[in-house]
Image (tube, helix red, strand yellow):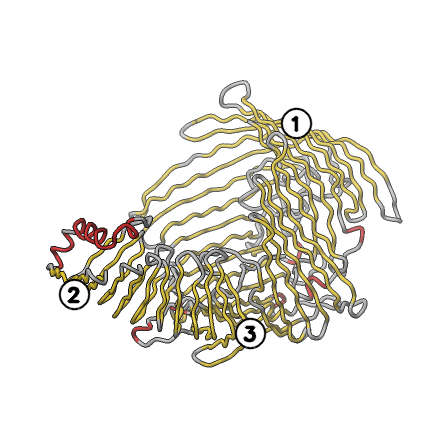
Amino acid sequence: MRSYCYFDFPRATLHILVGVALLFVAAITGPSAQAQDSPVDFEADTVTVDEEKSILIATGNVRLTQAGDVLTADKIIYNRATDDARAIGNVIYLTTDGFEHRADEMELSKNFTHAIATPMISFFADGTRIDASRGEFHQGAKSLFDKSRFSPCKCDYDKGESPIWDLRSLSSSHNPETQTVVHQNVSMHIFGLPIFYFPVIAHADWTVKRRSGLLSPTIQYSNDLGTTVTVPYYQILGPTKDVEFKTTSFKLRGQGVKTIYRQRWNEADLDADIVLGKLDTYSEERQNVAAINAHFKTRIGDGWDLTANVKRSSQDTFLRRYGYHSSQRLNSALTATKIDDNRYYRVLASDMQGLATTDTEDDETTILPSVFYEKKRVGFTESQKITTQLSALQLDNDETHEMTRWTGLTKLEDKTELAGGVLDGSVAILGTYYDIQSNDTSTNQTSEFGQLNGIVSTGFRLPFAVQLWNAPISFEPRIQATLITGSDRTDEVPNRDSSDFRLDEANIFIPNQFQGRDYILPGSHIDTGVTALSSNNILGDVTAFAGVSYRSSGKTPSGLTSEGSDKYSDYVASVRLQTPYNTDVSWSGRASSNDLALNESHARVNYNNGNTSVSAVHKQIAKVYFLAATDDREEASFVLKQKIMDDVTFVANQTWDLSAGKTKRNVSSYSLLWSGGFQDCVTASLNYKRDPYSDRDVQNIEELQFLINFKYLGALPQIGY
């Protein structure tokens, strides 16, 4: 005789009686269920119990919760004797480790930690989806999927949307312990079309930040190198170290391998790139070449920051020709610095390698070493400041010169308020000793001499504000007089550390405007200028400066004027506008004090409204600042970044040489970038580059590159040489 017990509560009542339901489940399942680690929380519209067969049937909005896992269905049949359950109709199983399993029917066992469904749809925590004709799920262990379709694309399958790409496999598996997804007998479909076939594909799941294995390859074409294919392999060596091998085949020129090693310690970082290749060069075909670019940074001893850079190449041009590095000079350096209270220490040793055609051994400068020490302290009153500097320099192979220099400086500074403004001044004593040897075969001279200079400077600035057209404007006029006494050795000392000097608003009020120690020019000069600041609704924030320097005694150095002989320097001016129209404008330049002709100018315009970003730059400088120039140098560049739609961006970069009244197109690059849209599972870019630069075997190039990255199939951010 079969007996039944019926319970039919309204849904609202059942939510209130959750505790009663828990007691009921415990009662009907007996000791075996109570022995499980976590109880089952049970809800349903209607519950039917067959006591003879120990079967519970729940129907209508059934919900089971156990240890954070949630199972919902239209109907659940639970067998107490076997501890199995069968869920029927709109089955959704949510697990605490991020899975969502959907099925029409699902068999559950082992206290709901094992599930089998036919068919089955599973979603990873990040939205990645696997469809399978049959799925088997083990909580905390491997999940198996037969005749599966895998895609990380975020699309609305319920509305009939299709993923951009998917992997269709005979079988797939996910192992949460190894955090790996494996697909067997795979065909890769892009926009629904089968494109590639693979016997097996294994990749990391959504929980992995980095994983050893092959990364996305790149393919590009240039007129010089032909088709270039790069296949990267990434290997994790430990929690804080890894290595990447980028093997590249240049169809017309040979092969190369770039190894990128990275390691981190508590107070140290190491990044090292090593390039090895068998490539065509200007000296021979398939030459063995090598280069290194290593950067190491650490903190040692009592607060010393140590930085080491090693950059070296076995051959002059292969780095530029094959796209590993664009510079014409490689500089290796070892630097140690320390800041301690009011003291600063710096020790520097460096060696340069020139890669240009014109470079010789005499141009490959070595600094061994450069030592600098500075101490600041309060002077005789609280407003005074005393600075002491000591330095030593050994310079070799510097344009046929070798030089040793010792320098000492003591400076006293003070300032006070006067008549609504600020009066400041400084007195400095600078002593230098030189040992200079010329390696020029025609002279081959050695000189030893000392130099002593006194530098006295005083200045006054008076800030004030006015109201003009309902806009406040702040002005700060400033004037400063400087006297430099002592010996003049500018004709005997190779000017290295200030040879590129040109007057601008940054150095016009520095007493020794040349900043370095190799060019100390006795004489006197008066510097004056005015800074203006304003903000209004029409122009936005405005900053402007104008100034001029007058040499009252001593010879006029180059860099003050294009003529090199005037007492008055070029007029120095700049203006910067941050407008309320998404546009920033800046201009700086120098104009001749004789005829106001521009000797140098730098103009920039930036516009950005979110979807469109435009930057235009124009530079011009007079020919007198270049030894071999026959005309003024002039250059313009333009950068456009335009979002065509939410997931497509166009980027253009163009540079023009405008010297000698001509327009010559220099480096050009154009890119079309696709982010994969709202599905967020693929990125692609099409890049074109044209570079007219040539040097020996470095030819002017036209290069086309197509790059595509599929989510989870391997990619790393680009690491520069």
Q: Is residue 456 left or right of residue 638?
A: right
Q: Amino acid at mark 3?
A: Pro
Q: Amino acid at mark 1?
A: Ile
Task: Name the foreground residue: 128 vs 219.
Answer: 128
* Relative vertical location of residue 433 with respect to residue 201 in this rendering, above or below: above
Element under disc 2: loop
Q: Position of residue 24 (x, y in %)?
A: 19, 52
Q: Which residue is mark 1?
A: 429
Q: Which residue is mark 2?
A: 2
Element under disc 3: strand
From the viewer's perspective, is the residue at label 2 or at label 1 nearer?
A: 2
Q: Position of residue 293 (x, y in %)?
A: 67, 53
**Residue furthest to the top:** 380
Q: Residues within 10 Å of mark 2 (few under 14, many from 20)?
A: few
Q: Which residue is mark 3?
A: 199
Circles 2, 1 touching at the beta carbon (< 8 Å):
no
Which of disc 2 and disc 3 is earlier in sequence? Answer: 2
Element under disc 1: strand
Is residue 2 visible in the rendered structure shown here? yes
User: Real-space Cα distance between discs 2 and 1?
Assistant: 113 Å
Is residue 663 visible in the rendered structure shown here? no
Q: Is residue 201 left or right of residue 276?
A: left
Task: Name the foreground residue: 465 vs 611.
Answer: 611
User: Real-space Cα distance between discs 3 and 2?
Assistant: 56 Å
